[in-house]
Amino acid sequence: MIKISNVSYKISNEFELKELNLTINPGVHHLLGPNGAGKTSLLNLISGLCAVDKGSILIKDLEVDPLNLRALSKVRAYLLQKQTAHFALTVKAMLTITLSLTDKEIDKLCENNIIIKGLDLKPLLNRVITGLSGGETQRAHLARVLLHCAQEINPASCLLLDEPFTGLDVAHKLWLNQYLSLLGECITIIISHHELNLALNLAQPCIIINKGRIHSILSDSRDIERTTLLDVFNLPVAALIETNEGILQIIGI
C-alpha cells in the first residue's frame, strides 16, 4: 500500500504538485493526464528520487525519502520514462548486475522464466544494450524491473512504470497487460501512460491528474466521464464514440 498525505512539490515558479492525498492499495492503477500534468514528477516522489516539499509518502510503513534509497530499493521497482545506458553491457550482464545474481543463477533464470519468455528476451541476452532498437531496449528494462518484483528474496511490493508501452508492439503490450493484471493481485502497481483507449476498456482503478492536482480517482477506469475526456485531455466531441456496451472510445488514434 502507498499512502500520500498532503504532499506538495514545487517544480518551477510556474508549476507545482499541490496538496495531493492518495491511498493506493494493491492492484493495477492507471495514472492518466495530459503532457505536463505532473505524472512523472509524482512517480519520482513516490520512488524517492525526489524529496517532497511538504507532506509525507509511505510505502507500507517505510517513509519515502531520497535518504532512504537503499531501503526503498528493496520494496519498490521503478521503470523510468527515459533509460540511459552508460556502459556497453549485454542485456544478460545488465540483468546479472542489477539483480545481484551469479552467472549460473542468471543462466538458470533465463532458461525458463515467464518474464523472459513473455518479452521475447532470449534473442537479446547476448546483445549489447546500446545497440538495441527502442522497443528492444524497452523490453530489456521492463524485464529488469519485473524480475526485481519477482525475486524470491526481498521481492518488491510496489511497481512504478512510467510509459511502459512506449516502443512495444501489440503482442508485447498484450502480454504486459495480462502479466500486470496477475501481478496486481499481490502488489501495488502504478502505470503512467497515454493509452486512453486501453484504460477505457479495463475494469481497473485510475488516477487522473491535471495541472499538478488530482482531478479524479476512479475504482473502474471504464467510468471516466465524457466531460473529463473533453476538458482534461482537450479532445473534440467528434473523437468520442460509445460502444454497444456503453464504453467510451476515442477514434482516430
Image: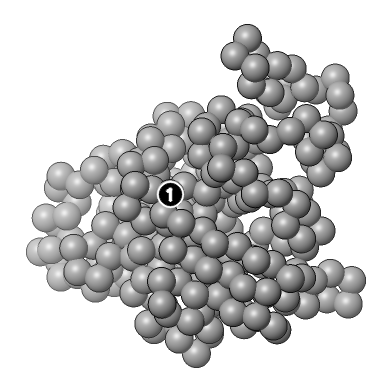
Q: Mark 1 points at which residue?
A: 27
Tell which residue pokes out farthest to the top in this image. Answer: 244
* Quadrant of res 126: bottom left
**125 over 176 or under it: above or below:** below
Identified at 42% across, 79% down, the residue is 62
* Quadrant of res 101: bottom left
**Residue 76 in sight in this render:** yes
The structure's colour scheme is one colour
Q: For the residue marked with disc 1, what is the amino acid?
A: Gly
**Residue 133 in sight in this render:** no
Front one among 246 and 9: 246
**244 over 170 or under it: above or below:** above
Identified at 83% across, 76% down, the residue is 12
Q: Is residue 136 left or right of residue 240?
A: left
Q: Position of residue 106 (x, y in %)?
A: 18, 61
- Placement of the C terminus among the 4 image quadrants: top right
